[in-house]
Image: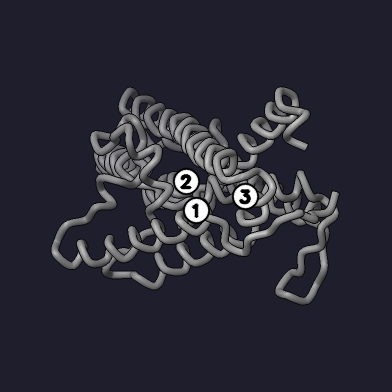
Amino acid sequence: MEFRPSRFEVIPPVVKNLLIINALVFFATIVIGKMGFDITEYLALHHWSSDKFKVWQIVTHLFMHGGNINDPDGGFLHLFSNMFALWMFGAILENYFGPKRFLTFYFLCGIGAAILYLGVLTYDFSQIKSAIADFNANPTYKQLSRYITQNHISENTSLGQILYNIRDQWAENPMSTEYASTVSGTLQAFYTSQIDQGCVGASGAVFGILFAFGYLFPNTLLYMYFLFPIKAKYFVGFYALFELYAGIKNNAGDNVAHFAHIGGMIVAFIVIKIWNRTHRKNFF
């Protein structure tokens, strides 16, 4: 299916207002940050086991894009990429769905993505807690090595990087007990830092929009770097596979919430299927 609307607005009302709100929140984050108050701590999405978690963060994180006073450029690039995609694909979907349905779709994708992301974090955190409990029960070099091997901990992950580093140092004197408290304390500090880390951005909702575009208009040509044509269905498929690969690989230093992106796509698929089934007459 190709997109040929009977009435087209370049920047329809919902997309326009979302762009404005996200931009205002970004600059407000910088301005308020200069006053010594970090609103990211209250509006970014934190894991539900963290003391920083608040229910409203499931929604408010969609309007946050960093704006860290020490790294405003990084936040701006995050904002720009999300808002560009929102305008590029969201405008078409809003013209197609209509404002009310598009706004509903946007928030369903964003909130659904956040819930899936928190679920994945819960699994990841359970592994860290298991590592702490297992090691504390038998704080030896052999136990640390056994845990790394049995659980296939990758050195490319944040946790793996810490454990391998300590294990390599401990290997020089495996009978020593001086590293026991280091391992336990390091794992606990890592766990605390992870659950208190906030997630920001509209990426979950934007990836839902991207998937919907590829699903509804699969043969529409997109131009990579404005030069190379590729059908929307292939572009979306490649992006989904890349996000899944990156999320599973979980490289150290990768602070992108890949499973939130996947979550947005999954929710988009489910919503479109439900709408197609229950509103077949007026949806297509």
> Which image quadrant for residue 106?
top right
Give me the residue at 59% from left, 60% from top.
Answer: 85
Image spot of residue 12 (x, y percent): 57, 57
Image spot of residue 273 (x, y percent): 72, 30
Residue count near mark 3 (Cα–Cα under 10 Å), binned few <14, some 14–19, many ≥20: many
Q: Nearer the viewer, mark 2 or mark 1?
A: 1
SS for dot 1? loop
Image spot of residue 267 (x, y percent): 61, 34
Residue type beneath disc 1: Val
Q: Which of the two discs, 2 and 1, labels the residue nearer the N terminus?
A: 2
Q: CA distance from mark 1 to mark 3?
A: 27 Å
Residue type beneath disc 2: Gly
Image spot of residue 94 (x, y percent): 62, 49
**In the rendered image, which residue does mark 1 sit on?**
256
Task: Specify the label residue 225 is tagged with.
Answer: none
Task: Say whether residue 172 is visible.
Answer: no
Question: Residue 190 versus residue 145: which sits nearer the camera?
Answer: 190
Give me the residue at 60% from left, 49% from top.
Answer: 207
